[in-house]
Image (cartoon, coloured by chain):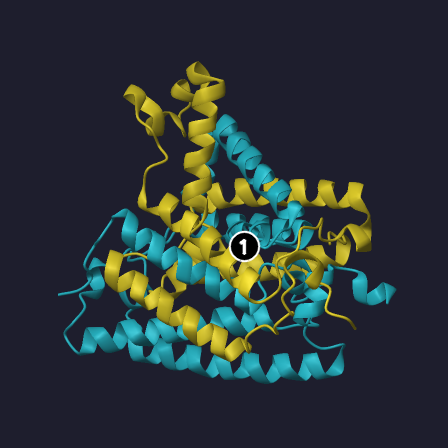
Chain colours: A cyan, B yellow
């Protein structure tokens, strides 16, 4: 019965290599391409993330239905609504300003981007600032608005898993339609040669 | 436009994958990770451990006394060896390999041409700082909480993704970081 709950170095390395390989090939090492999502010019971030979420959620559901996977044994983040909302605001602001999120900064650095290394230094500084301020006040804010009945939409409110996946599927189609419309209206997705040349190179050319 | 990466690796620049293809492959990698380990993919688990380790090297007394990081380094424990560290090492290897094979490996300060070198270093540092702080508040980042949590249909993940994108859309209009 899955999951195997392997915590060894080999599974970490293999899953990580595949993760990094896909992210770079998607163009997610480029801060120019990543932030083009926020100007609506390039919808790759929404499209890739949403597709991955739907594929993984559907796969987990199918394995559960087939009796191969115990879904209750998977890690699910605790439903701390305030902590997630505040964290989302800060990581989103950091993404728009810095050009990366934590995972993509590793991809950026290992495709040669020194600004991504600066971002990683910032990540460490942010962690230390948080650790320095950590105490009852931050803990109190972080524990606000917890959904007491459960961590998933199924457990908390009894929404069927198939319905949630169907909603995500519909939203995915919407993201692709809306995204492609915006992309046709503007300059279109950031291509590899522009990303390699660096942000601003297309404006100068 | 000429392919600029030839200066670095001599390889022609290959186009990025179609987003639908990249999304499907990423979803399958995430699914494999869940089946194999019981949890998803992440990033800031490793940077937090690195922060604890570095803190313990530079300022051991303060780090060991710290309420948040102290537990990771108590009794001489080394916080670095862990699954998430190996996974991030893997991300680095996979990204390097993909960038090299795709002719997209090029050493640069990306954004220097659009906003200037000094401003780009500042925006990268401030962006990283906000992101590092925010990921500790949410106990996860875009990968660990947003992507992986959403695949398990976790409430926290969708709350995070909603405020993440709303904040990014607004902040992008206020500050040009790249």
Q: Residue at x 73, y 64 (%)?
A: B4
Q: Quadrant of the N terminus of chain A?
A: bottom left
x and y percent of residue A35 in the render?
67, 61
The one nearer the camera, B122 or A113, is A113
Instruction: Using the rendered view, name the quadrant where residue A52 is placed.
Output: bottom left
The one nearer the camera, A168 or A81, is A168
Vertical relation: A41 (above or below) B75: below
- The answer to whether one can see residue A28 in this image is yes
Please, which residue is most extreme toward the front here? B10
x and y percent of residue A86 in the render?
53, 48
- The answer to whether one can see residue A136 in this image is no
Q: Residue at x 81, y 55 (%)?
A: B114
Circle 1 sits on which residue?
A107
The one nearer the camera, B77 or A135, is B77
Q: Quadrant of the C terminus of chain A?
A: bottom right
Position of B153 compared to A71: left or right? right
> Chain letter of disc 1?
A
Please, which residue is most extreme toward the right here? A204
x and y percent of residue A192 in the render?
66, 69
Position of B88 compared to A161: left or right? right
Vertical relation: B32 (above or below) B18: above
Q: Residue at x 37, y 25 (%)?
A: B70
Provide the secondary structure element on which disc 1 rests: helix
């Amino acid at each position: 019965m899955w999951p195997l709950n392997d915590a060894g170095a080999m599974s970490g390395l293999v899953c990580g290599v595949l993760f990094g390989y896909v992210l770079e090939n998607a163009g997610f090492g480029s801060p120019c391409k990543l932030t083009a999502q926020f100007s609506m010019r390039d919808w790759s971030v929404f499209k890739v993330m949403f597709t991955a979420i739907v594929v993984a959620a559907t796969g987990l559901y199918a394995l559960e239905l087939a009796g191969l996977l115990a879904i209750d044994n998977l890690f699910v983040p605790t439903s701390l609504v305030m902590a997630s909302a505040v964290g989302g605001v800060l990581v989103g602001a950091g993404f728009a300003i810095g050009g990366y999120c934590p995972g993509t900064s590793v991809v950026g650095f290992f495709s040669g981007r020194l600004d991504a290394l600066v971002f990683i230094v910032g990540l460490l500084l942010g962690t230390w600032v948080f650790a320095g301020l950590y105490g009852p006040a931050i803990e109190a804010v972080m524990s606000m608005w917890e959904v007491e009945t459960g961590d998933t939409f199924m457990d908390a409110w009894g929404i069927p898993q198939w319905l949630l996946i169907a909603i995500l599927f519909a939203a995915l189609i919407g993201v692709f339609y809306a995204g492609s419309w915006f992309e046709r209206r503007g300059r279109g997705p950031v291509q590899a040669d522009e990303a390699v040349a660096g942000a601003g190179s297309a404006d100068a050319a | 436009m000429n392919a600029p990466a030839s200066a670095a690796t001599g390889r022609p620049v290959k186009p990025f994958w179609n987003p639908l293809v990249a999304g499907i492959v990423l979803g399958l990698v995430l699914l494999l990770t869940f089946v194999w380990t019981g949890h998803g993919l992440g990033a800031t688990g490793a940077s937090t451990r690195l922060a604890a380790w570095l803190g313990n090297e530079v300022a051991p007394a303060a780090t060991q006394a710290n309420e948040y990081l102290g537990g990771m380094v108590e009794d001489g424990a080394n916080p670095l060896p862990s699954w998430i560290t190996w996974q991030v090492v893997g991300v680095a290897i996979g990204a390097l390999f993909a960038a090299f094979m795709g002719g997209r490996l090029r050493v640069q300060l990306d954004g220097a041409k659009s906003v200037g070198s000094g401003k780009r270093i500042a925006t990268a540092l401030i962006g990283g700082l906000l992101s590092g702080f925010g990921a500790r508040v949410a106990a996860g980042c875009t990968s660990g909480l947003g992507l992986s949590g959403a695949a398990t249909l976790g409430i926290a993940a969708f709350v995070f993704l909603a405020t993440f994108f709303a904040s990014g859309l607004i902040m992008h209009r206020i500050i040009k970081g790249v």
